[in-house]
Image: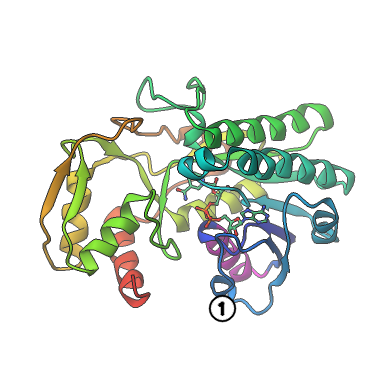
Amino acid sequence: MKALVTGGAGFIGSNLVRLLVEKKHSVTVLDNLSTGHLSNLGPFPSVKFIKGDIRDERTISRALRGVDIVFHLAASVGNSLSIKAPVYDSETNVLGTLKLLRAAHQNHIKKIVYSSSAGILGELKELPINENHPTNPISPYGVSKLAAEKMCLVYNSLYGMKNVCLRYFNVYGINQRYDAYGNVIPIFARRIIRKQPLFIFGDGYQTRDFVNVIDVAKANYQAAITGKVAGAFNIASGASITINKLANMMMQTARTTVPLQHKKPRLGDVRDSLANISAARKAFGFKPSVSLEEGLKKYMSWASQNRF
Ligand SMILES: NC(=O)c1ccc[n+]([C@@H]2O[C@H](COP(=O)([O-])OP(=O)(O)OC[C@H]3O[C@@H](n4cnc5c(N)ncnc54)[C@H](O)[C@@H]3O)[C@@H](O)[C@H]2O)c1
């Protein structure tokens, strides 16, 4: 098949590109390199790269030429950025997705696999979280990811597309760079490698459901090749771990210890998170295969080689 991966130079996108290339598919990447890196695509010379913006209809049309399936990952990512730049966030995430949907439909493409987010849920009410959980996002990013998800589903009901929205929980793994604002695993990795103390907000007994990017890439692939599947699905590991335990596991993996310093809980952080992933298992055979121990080992080794 010929696949278009928007956001393919980013963290998750580049891992998906690797899988598609391994499976011998022809791949085009559309990315404006705002947070992605061309070096992530260095190992895949067969990939056609288009530097362009998902908000630009002409660029989308060019990228869609001859394409059978679209994986849509390009987005303005994260709560903090969306609070600083809410218009840019919605232009990219909502209007960008809508322009892509419209062009894909005009080009007779049957399926877009859209990278949604657990951020659309807002405050978590009941665990484990299933796909019927209420959606009350608490940031412009959560709202824009939810609006884009709904738009994908509206195209299913209006035009019989088979779009799939994958709601990722906490994704980690190779090509995930240090990001001062958000993700705990790269932040801990950097501080452990630099032998600096780890800051934990609150008592550290809050829990998160971490899923390896290799499994997220597989979920995209399986959702794509299972033609009939459509709708929204949780993508996570289906298991949770406390932040204290995560810190200890990462130190053990690096065979070192650094002090743990507890700080005041952060406003807006949820206490616990755990996904029910049985719908994705039933619909397209999603089954996480990388254990947190194994995934952290590979990640710590990648992070040490990449000058964290
Ligand atoms: N990382 C996570 O834990 C997580 C969790 C939930 C959902 N997601 C979703 O997964 C997707 C990929 O996220 P990621 O973590 O790989 O982030 P990332 O920032 O590494 O990837 C996003 C990619 O999109 C590109 N991009 C941004 N705006 C663009 C635009 N206007 N036009 C073209 N390209 C543009 C960036 O350059 C980058 O390569 C996003 O849609 C995100 O919302 C990620």
Image quadrant where one finds the N terminus: bottom right
What residue does disc 1 label?
A: 43
Give percent across and percent down for residue 233.
54, 35
Crowding around mark 1 (Cα neighbors within 10 Å: few <14, some 14 to 19, many 20+) is few
Image quadrant where one finds the C terminus: bottom left
Our reading of the magenta stretch's main secondary structure is helix
**In the image, which residues are magenta?**
13-24
Q: Quadrant of residue 301?
A: bottom left
**Residue 281 at least partly seen:** no
Q: Quadrant of residue 209?
A: top left
Give percent across and percent down for residue 90.
65, 38
121 relative to 267 in the view: left or right: right
- Work out which residue is located at the far front of the displayed protein and give it: 84
Give percent across and percent down for residue 157.
77, 27
How many tags in the picture? 1
Assess whether residue 15 is covered by the magenta stretch: yes
Residue drawn at (37%, 55%) of the image: 180
* 228 is higher (above) or lower (below) than 247: above
Give percent across and percent down for residue 201.
22, 40
Residue drawn at (74%, 44%) of the image: 111
